[in-house]
Image (cartoon, rainbow, N blue to C red):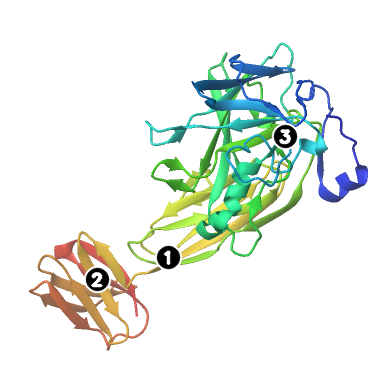
């Protein structure tokens, strides 16, 4: 499709721009009005300019069929919630109200824990020598309406993501990036849901000659993903892209009991995807949106999030650990603050118990010759103490 560059809109919302040469718009693909191509001709693929999109179609007879991979379409139904309405974008058209666009369906491998079976496209580097600048993505109508049905996504705090992997078959290299299509985990910000065509950066693909696409969701059941596994593409190598305001919601304080774990989340929306998440976890760097930690004492973690156009957020996240209750090797230690008693319970005899202050000075010791007992610590002033139980191999901080 052809786009008119609006300078004032670009200035207001933030724009990436590049020459609009060699853009895959799908408009040269012939279709009857309100129709689609889904591979029923058994050709196994279709080509638009410099990219070949693969498709698998199975005719089961009696009018029954299945397909996966890529199709192209000009259908516009944004209201019918049905698996029969699988060829319409949630926007109701292609990007910028164009007619044609691509839609993909990703099947799940029921023999391999319902992992997605990636759909693929091949880049003809003899026709496309440059790095792909970007493209536009959106949900399709069926998957979008499913998310709203009975507030499934809102109630379940679900997310829906696409993974793109770029391959260079000559150098045998690959690189992947994640793109969030819907995210309902926000508490104070409106959910992210790509019903409208949204520009994503693709410059990270470099000189790749093949792309694969997979989708993942937290909305998972006994028979695999519940969310219909579709997404839509348009204007590949598009010449410009606007960004919506970048927003973040990163919880900065968690409270747990020693022995428990907690999931830390960096929730962001807007800007231009892909996002880069970088967690500093006790000296290790993890590039993921969520991390699970189980500190034994109060610990600080650090997260940095960047998008493709320079938006950045840096946050410190503290996990406050209540050390008055721990479970270790089937041993339970609990400080009853209300009665000033240190309650100890174990499957084996407890033996010698020593309590030190924070400087290492021995404050109290007691020998317990059974598996359950309590030590009154009412004479200890408020502060941090170390409980040592050699027979149970426990050394633990407590707060009084």
**Rendered image: mark on residue 311:** none
Q: Indicate which disc, 3 or 1, sits on the residue closer to the N terminus.
A: 3
Q: In what element is the residue under mark 3?
A: loop
- Which of the two marks, 1 or 2, is nearer to us in this view? 2
Q: Indicate which disc, 1 or 2, sits on the residue closer to the N terminus.
A: 1
Q: Nearer the viewer, residue 122 or 92?
A: 92
Answer left or right for 282 relative to 252: left
**Rendered image: mark on residue 298:** 1
Inter-mark Cα distance, 3 to 1: 55 Å
The residue indicated by pointer 3 is 75
- Which of the two marks, 3 or 2, is nearer to us in this view? 3
Inter-mark Cα distance, 1 to 2: 18 Å
Can you say whether 339 is above or below 392 in the image? below
Q: In what element is the residue under mark 1?
A: loop
What residue is at 76 percent from the left and 38 percent from the top?
A: 93
Q: Indicate which disc, 3 or 2, sits on the residue closer to the N terminus.
A: 3
- Which of the two marks, 3 or 1, is nearer to us in this view? 3
The residue indicated by pointer 2 is 333
Q: Nearer the viewer, residue 391 or 176?
A: 176
Can you say whether 196 is above or below 133 in the image? below
Whether residue 85 appears in this view of the structure is yes
| Spot occupied by residue 150 in the image (x, y as percentages of width and height) | 55, 57
Inter-mark Cα distance, 3 to 2: 64 Å
What residue is at 69 percent from the left and 27 percent from the top?
A: 36
């Amino acid at each position: 499709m052809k786009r008119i560059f609006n300078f004032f809109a670009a200035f207001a919302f933030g724009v990436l721009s590049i020459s609009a040469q060699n853009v895959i718009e799908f408009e040269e693909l012939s279709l009857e009005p309100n129709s689609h191509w889904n591979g029923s001709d058994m050709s196994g693929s279709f080509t638009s300019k410099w990219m070949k999109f693969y498709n698998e179609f199975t005719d089961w007879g009696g009018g029954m069929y299945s397909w996966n991979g890529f199709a192209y379409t000009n259908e516009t139904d944004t209201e019918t919630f049905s698996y029969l309405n699988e060829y319409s974008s949630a926007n109701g058209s292609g990007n910028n109200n164009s007619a044609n666009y691509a839609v993909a369906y990703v099947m799940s491998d029921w023999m391999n824990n319902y992992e997605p079976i990636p759909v693929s496209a091949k880049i003809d580097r003899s026709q496309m020598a440059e790095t792909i600048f970007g493209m536009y993505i959106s949900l399709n109508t069926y998957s979008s309406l499913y998310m709203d049905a009975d507030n499934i996504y809102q109630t379940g705090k679900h997310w829906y993501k696409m993974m793109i992997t770029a391959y260079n078959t000559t150098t045998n290299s690959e690189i992947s990036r994640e793109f969030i299509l819907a995210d309902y985990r926000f508490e104070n910000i409106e959910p992210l849901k790509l019903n409208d065509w949204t520009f994503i950066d693709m410059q990270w693909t470099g000189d790749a000659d093949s792309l694969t696409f997979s989708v993942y969701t937290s909305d998972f059941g006994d028979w695999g993903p519940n969310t219909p596994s579709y997404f839509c593409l348009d204007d590949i190598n598009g010449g410009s892209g606007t960004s919506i305001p970048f927003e973040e919601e990163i919880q900065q304080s968690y409270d747990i009991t020693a022995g428990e774990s907690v999931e830390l989340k960096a929730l962001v929306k807007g800007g231009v995807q892909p996002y880069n998440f970088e967690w500093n976890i006790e000296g290790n760097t993890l590039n993921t949106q969520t991390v699970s930690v189980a500190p034994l004492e109060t610990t600080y973690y650090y997260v940095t999030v960047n998008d493709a156009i320079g938006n950045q957020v840096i946050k410190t996240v503290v996990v406050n650990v209540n050390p008055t209750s721990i479970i270790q090797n089937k041993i339970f230690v609990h400080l009853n603050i209300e009665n000033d008693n240190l309650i100890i319970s174990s499957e084996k005899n407890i033996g010698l118990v020593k309590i030190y202050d924070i400087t290492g000075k021995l404050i109290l010791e007691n020998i317990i010759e059974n598996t359950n007992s309590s030590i009154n610590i009412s004479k200890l002033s408020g502060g941090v103490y170390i409980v040592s139980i050699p027979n149970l191999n426990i050394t633990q901080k407590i707060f009084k």
